[in-house]
Amino acid sequence: MFSRKAGVPEALRRLPGIAARIASAVPIPAVLVGLGVFAVYALGACRTMYVGDSGELVAAAATLGIPHPSGYPLYVLLGKLWMLAVPVGSIALRMSLFSAACAAAACGGLYALARRLDLGPGAAWFGALTLAFSPSFWSQANIQRVYSLNALFVVAATSAAVLWYRTRKPRSLVLAFFLAGLGACNHTFMGIFAIALGVFALVSEPRLLRRLPTLAACGAAAVAGLGPYLYLPLRSRADPRLDWGDPETPGRFLDVIGRRDFWDRAWLEAPGDLGVIAADYLRGLGSELAWAGAALALVGAIAGWRRWPVLLPLLVMAANLCTVGLHGSRSDIFIWHRYYIPSYVMAALLAGFGWQYLTERRIAPDPSAKRWRAAAALVIPLLLLVAGYRHFDRSRYRLAEDFSRALLETLPPGAHLAASDDNILFVLIYLHLVEGLRPDLDLILQGVGDAELPALRFDPDTDPLYFTHHPNWNLPALEVVPVGLVFRTVRAGSPLPEPVIPKWELDGEADPRVPRDYLTQNLIGHFHYMLGITFETRDWLRARREFVKATEAAPRNDVLFYNLGLIYRRNGLLRRALQDFERSAQINPRHIASNRPVRPADRVAELRREIERVEGIESRLASRTELAGLAAGSAVYHRRLSALLDEEGERGVARGHRLLALEIEAD
């Protein structure tokens, strides 16, 4: 028992023993659940580096660096230990298996928690396996990300909190707060979890407000759990190659862990947006738990109010929704439901409550139906497994690494490469720092520490500088020219450098067995977009084919359609540009992700006025003898109309008609 005499240090001293006893109490079926789920994840584990944050996180773990805010020190340290302890395959594969192990442990832990709450085996299987094969949870369980480890901490801290709820022994509550603090060193959501845990504890036992030693012990435990954050300033002093934010001073340290100035793309703009976000959240719960599971979660929340600690899951879910809704961008809220994984963990537990309530009290209360209830509990998880395996089998995934390897192959020895965009920059970081690919290159990590490109001194003739994305320079002496998968800086007026095209299709792009999530679709789209703009002035027909491939590959990428609208507009293809601006606005009516805040809808309005003006000119020119007797829309008609528009000084629109004639002649 915790006592005033024991004090805070004594309570903290007992934590390892408490955790060991909890671990020893894990039932064998929970271990079997975890092992079975791990086998599924491992079979489909990504063998190469995945898109998004993966490359940077793994590079940080491999080199003991500091990734983007909040620094993720626990993931970095545990990842490094895992790499050393599990020498299986590439570093990328090892970290995919690390996610698989964490996700499987979370599922096994959820089973054990359900059984500890006196749920039957069927209800426990239902909750654990429904979580295991829910789309967003599974999507993070075999790639290199922090979300599976976060789910494990959600389950562990909830288990400790439930143990306190049932025994009212303060040391269990202290352990729950310690786990919340420790988990926050992997993902800051666990700090929000600690707030929900505090509300749950005070509502469950208001007398805690008068037990100051217990409150002090809980606070001290949470702070002690944050200890791994000390890794950031200590490691930063050694100046690792990957040192985001340089968190050596107190101010910069707080900037990194608080994500200050790192993310300012919140989608929420007005109170009315709250309803839209909440509606999408509820739809997500339905699709993640196969709707029947979501219905059971609702039953569990209502019917289990007096029987089970329902309040904690509901508080965690509400906190998760509010955090993402207030902070998240359009993609965070509506596309990447991985941010809602803590909610899905809690909803799966509630679904187990619902299954227990319905099968024991309503549908099959007869004890003789116990085996039937257990077997029936596997139906929905098995449906999720069968439906999802093709989508989450990443064993053939090569796309992200293939893109970056192809990009690096195009650069001459000793070149400077300024890289940006998580999809490209982070994989390049991994290949360059971990696998040692192209050590001769100077890889300039845009965004690592500062959003602005550092001051550069170079001779474009002898000291080539390349960019993965156009830097939007406006320097009369320099031009930035697309030459394949990168842009090259050249002196203004110089002959265009020849493009280097390493391939026309990425490895696995056409393979239906290779899953393509939103980020992967965007990467494939960017690949073909870069090929398209490389040939924009060299070979329009080739460029047009690549632009079509880009939109087919990434049909939900608002930025891609916006950029294509700009390209078609500058080439005089106004109606095509309008179509793409409208598509961009349809995907995202808000500001798109850009160096400058722009709304596609603004371009739509501008372009409609421009089209109306040009149509007036073309209507007047249609009566000219040069166009008499020609079929409107024929190649000859477009060429002659182009010549007339040139005479009118409408150079851009004239070019558009020449390009249309070229396309018609090629068909």
Image: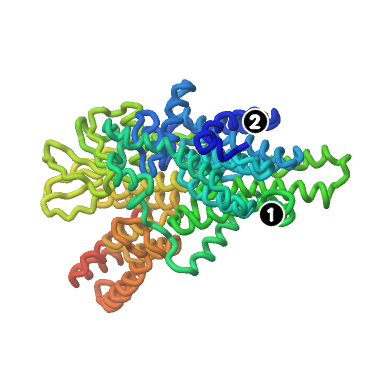
Relative depth, front residue between 428 and 481: 428
Q: Residue at x 66, y 50 (%)?
A: 290
Relative depth, front residue between 507 and 664: 507
Q: In this view, does 134 lie above or below 558?
A: above
Distance of label 2 from label 1 (alpha carbons): 28 Å
Residue 144 rendering spot, x and y as whole percentages: 46, 36
Check disc 2: other Cα within 10 Å, few if <14, some if 14-19, many if 20+: some
Residue occupied by mark 1: 301
Its colouring scheme is: rainbow
Q: Is residue 586 above or below residue 207?
A: below
Residue 231 rendering spot, x and y as whole percentages: 37, 34
Q: Is mark 2 on a helix, strand or loop?
A: helix
Asked if residue 398 lies left or right of residue 30, the reply is left
Q: Which residue is drawn at 21% across and 47% down?
A: 481
Relative depth, front residue between 467 and 300: 300
How many numbered callouts?
2
Q: Does residue 496 show up?
A: yes
Asked if residue 519 lies left or right of residue 616, the reply is right
Residue occupied by mark 2: 36
Q: In which quarter of the image is residue 128?
A: top right
Residue 409 rendering spot, x and y as whole percentages: 29, 32
Which amino acid type corresponds to the residue marked 1 in the rendered image?
A: Ala
Which amino acid type corresponds to the residue marked 2 in the rendered image?
A: Gly
Which quadrant, please, contains the N terminus?
A: top right
Residue 262 rendering spot, x and y as whole percentages: 34, 50
Dot placed on the residue nearer the N-terminal end, 2 or 1: 2
Q: Does residue 657 show up?
A: no
